[in-house]
Image: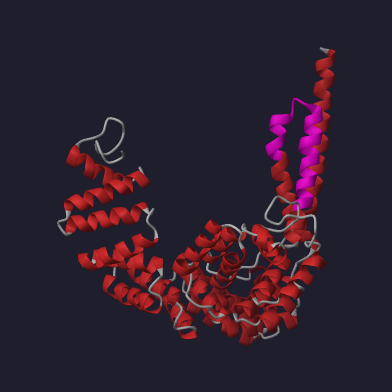
Amino acid sequence: MARAARRGAAVIVLLVVGLLSVTALVAAGLLLPIPRPDLCATLVTVALDGVARGCGDVARASAALAAGRAAAERKAYRDALAHYRVASTASPAVAGAHVARGELAEMLGEYDEALAAFQQAAAIAPSADTNLRLGATADRLGRADLAVQTLETASGPWRRHAAAGARAAAASFAACAPTSWSNPARLWHTCVTGSRDTYGFYFEVSREAVPRWVFRILVEEGRRERALAFARERGWLRADVEYCGHHALPIDDETSALLAILTQPERADCALPAAVRIADDGAARLGRMMLLDRIAHSRERETRERAQHFLRYRLPDHEVPRLAEALNATGWRLQHVHDDPDDALAVFQKAIQADPRFSWPHHNIGRIYMGRHDYEQARVWLERALEVNPDHWRALYNYGVTNANLQRWPEALSAYRTALAIAPSDARLHANVGWTLIKLGQEAEAERELQIALRLDPSLQAERNYLNARYGRDARGGPTPSSTR
């Protein structure tokens, strides 16, 4: 009994110490008020309201900012931008009015206006947040020198990084303590010490977030020596680190892959999946550069072939200007994040003006019309995408879908088969070929395609139901007696 009581008391003491340790970390970071930049510029307008009572211009600006916030909440983003323009004109000495205008302008692809607004805000009230916005906009405009210069002063205060570390430490301790409370030694060494280590790691990760962005810009611009010098200054460049392996540096997979390309090109195949993720996120330029590097330097034939395949069928067939790439990404966010396809259309058109050979915005406009079930217009834009890049796999796929919705079955089949030759293991494509063949009366061949689709993806229910209705259910779980053999 006495031993159990002593042990219980020890556990309680350790829990209290652990909680106090984590609480100290939280007090250092998690509970600190960290301003969150958003469209409303809430904190700025609160301050503005406080002085509005004594100043007519500021009161007008305050009313315009409120109207802008209301319009943004209604997703009337152009109206919101107009209100923010009024606010920044009425009270040009208030940084928050310029920030609000800059955020909306950047969101709508009006990068020149956004840059000017953020520069005015930075001149009035310099801050890391404003410099971050300014640097991001300069990057989208392709003004790499201004972007790097500004972002180097945008890492943010110590408290911000402490907050990131504290959140991670609290989560770590909360996950560990329930499974370790009966073992005082484990509670201390695993939970308390572990949460402190977690705090330190995520503090560093947060502190290096903006520098990682600077490094990416330098690499993408081809400034490799400067990028390496920058990495050396940050302490990332070390001879004992295998960048495509496990390491404890506070950098992400992308930065690790780029450092591997620069310093260990023959052992940098982790750059291939990183390039795929980067390209899928809309960064065609950097993805292209990384894939070309793997084609040139990888020792593995399979890696070189996969890089060549992805480069040909999933990326533009040329180096896209930074402005066109940024506008395409902005249009995508307007369409999918902000649910504003009308403004997205306008931004995609600007991307096409910046680079008429860039097939992605043509394809994305086609996707908008597909979403509206206006397949005739979708077909026009998808044809344009394929005119500028006949190997654009996603455009081929959606051109098939669009023609199928228009009941243009031969054209749908041709598009699907061309796309299938590029991606022969795509179950959905095999299924689409099968359904199209049924419409064309070629049932025997259609059933073979549906069977292949089910072998590749057994979860396809409509295809399974069709084959079951034709041939009966296979007792082993397959759709037909022969389809999965």
Of the pair 238 and 341, the residue shown nearer to us: 238
Q: Quadrant of residue 303?
A: bottom right
Q: Is residue 352 above or below residue 367?
A: below
Residue at left 55%, top 72%?
A: 69
Q: What stretch is highlighted in magenta?
A: 174-201
The reply to whether residue 381 is visible in this rendering is yes
Q: Which residue is drawn at 65% across and 82% down?
A: 143
Q: From what the image shows, is residue 448 above or below residue 220?
A: above
Q: Where is residue 384 in the image (x, y as percent from the top left)?
A: 35, 78
| Placement of 450 over or under 129, stated as above or below | above
| Image quadrant in which the N terminus is located | top right
The part of the image, by quadrant, that contains residue 20 is top right
Outermost residue, top side: 1
Magenta stretch containing residue 177, yes or no? yes
User: Residue at 31% across / 38% down in the picture?
Assistant: 485
**Residue 225, image x, y percentages:** 75, 74
Task: State whether the magenta stretch is mostly helix, strand or loop.
Answer: helix
Residue drawn at point x = 34 percent, y = 73 percent: 382
Percent position of residue 179, x then y: 69, 30
Any part of residue 372 in sight: no
Residue in the foreground of this view, choosing between 343 and 148: 148
Give the quarter of the image for residue 291. bottom right
Is 35 on the left or on the right of 386, as rendered?
Answer: right
